[in-house]
Image (spheres, helix red, strand yellow):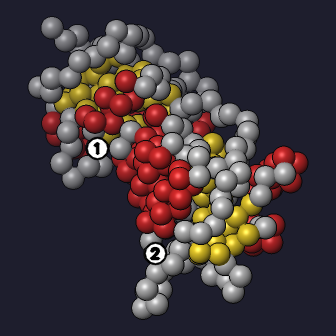
């Protein structure tokens, strides 16, 4: 039997908040503090990083979050949904109409998780890594992280990238963000480590001196890929020892960033 109790924030309390009571809750109003917290986590990157929390929406994503131990603190479940709630995880139930108010999915599956964001790790740049420069589209970023997880290639997010813990990005990763959280670092730090550790830097760009990626020796390098429209930013272009190109039909101008990154990831994987 559900207990009807009002509590405070759950799953990464807002700054200055000391959290609510550790008991279940039946939520019926969109004015509920936890509902407002979830909606703000989905909407604001700044708020996510202040709270060190984010939202996973959908059965598959929540299962992956629980499986890989990424600090699921609470489950928000639609009334009538049968989903196992592990010990120590708070269970919050709500009617279908309220779930539709919260979820951004066209057809909500009725399962959301409030997850703790991993603590930031210092950059330890590894040869064979892929650097993402300015990948702003959440769908592209999530797809790249999913492919990088499949090929087991380390990824570092550089300046201007979308938030890997934004709701759209998390959904596009299909759980990869839980299995292999990406590092995040400024271009200056990445370039400094390349210099200090003598790691060759490659960039993908149109150039008269660009090498065909199929014949390039990428072993021991780190490689930067930029956006379809803007390409790789100036600091990386200026510091690069080598420029790479993906050969394609002359009638095609460019590849989508996620597609180009997947081709590059395959080549990096072959060099491991």
Q: Residue at x 45, y 34 (%)?
A: 178
Residue 235 visible: no
Residue 116, horizontal then vertical, whole percent? 50, 28
Residue 222, horizontal then vertical, whole percent? 69, 55
| Mark 1 and mark 2 residues within 8 Å of each other at the beta carbon | no
Q: Is residue 20 above or below residue 80?
A: above
Q: Which residue is situated farthest in the bottom direction here?
A: 251
| Upstream in sequence: badge 1 or badge 2 | 1
Q: Secondary structure at mark 2?
A: loop
Q: Residue at x 51, y 78 (%)?
A: 247
Taking depth in this image into account, of 195 and 71 the one nearest to the observer is 195
- Alpha carbons under labels 1 and 2: distance apart: 32 Å
Q: Is residue 200 above or below residue 255?
A: above
What residue does disc 2 label?
Answer: 255
Residue 153, horizontal then vertical, whole percent? 55, 46
Q: Residue at x 37, y 51 (%)?
A: 172
Taking depth in this image into account, of 118 and 244 the one nearest to the observer is 244
What residue does disc 1 label?
Answer: 103
Q: Which residue is situated farthest in the left direction here?
A: 80
Closer mark to the observer between disc 1 and disc 2: 2
Taking depth in this image into account, of 6 and 104 the one nearest to the observer is 104
Q: Residue at x 68, y 33 (%)?
A: 121
């Amino acid at each position: 039997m559900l207990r009807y109790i009002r509590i405070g924030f759950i799953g990464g309390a807002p700054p200055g908040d000391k959290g609510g009571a550790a008991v279940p809750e039946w939520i019926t109003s969109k004015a509920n503090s936890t509902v407002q917290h979830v909606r703000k986590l989905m909407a604001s990157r700044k708020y996510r990083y202040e709270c060190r929390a984010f939202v996973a929406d959908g059965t598959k994503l929540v299962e992956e979050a629980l499986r890989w131990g990424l600090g699921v603190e609470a489950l928000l479940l639609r009334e009538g949904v049968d989903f196992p709630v592990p010990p120590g995880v708070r269970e919050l139930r709500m009617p279908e109409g309220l779930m539709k108010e919260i979820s951004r999915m066209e057809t909500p599956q009725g399962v959301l998780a409030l997850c703790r964001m991993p603590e930031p790790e210092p950059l330890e740049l590894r040869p064979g890594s892929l650097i993402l420069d300015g990948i702003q589209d959440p769908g592209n970023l999530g797809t790249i992280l999913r492919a990088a997880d499949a090929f087991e290639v380390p990824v570092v997010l550089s300046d201007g990238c979308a938030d890997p813990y934004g709701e759209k990005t998390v959904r596009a990763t299909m759980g990869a963000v839980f299995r292999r959280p990406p590092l995040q670092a400024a271009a200056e730090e990445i370039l400094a480590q390349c210099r200090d550790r003598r790691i060759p830097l490659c960039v993908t760009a149109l150039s008269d001196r660009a090498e065909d990626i199929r014949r390039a020796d990428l072993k021991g390098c780190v490689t930067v890929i930029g956006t379809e429209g803007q390409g790789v930013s100036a600091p990386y272009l200026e510091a690069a020892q080598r420029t790479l190109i993906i050969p394609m039909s002359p009638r095609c101008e460019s590849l989508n960033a996620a597609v180009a990154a997947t081709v590059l990831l395959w080549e990096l994987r072959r060099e491991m």
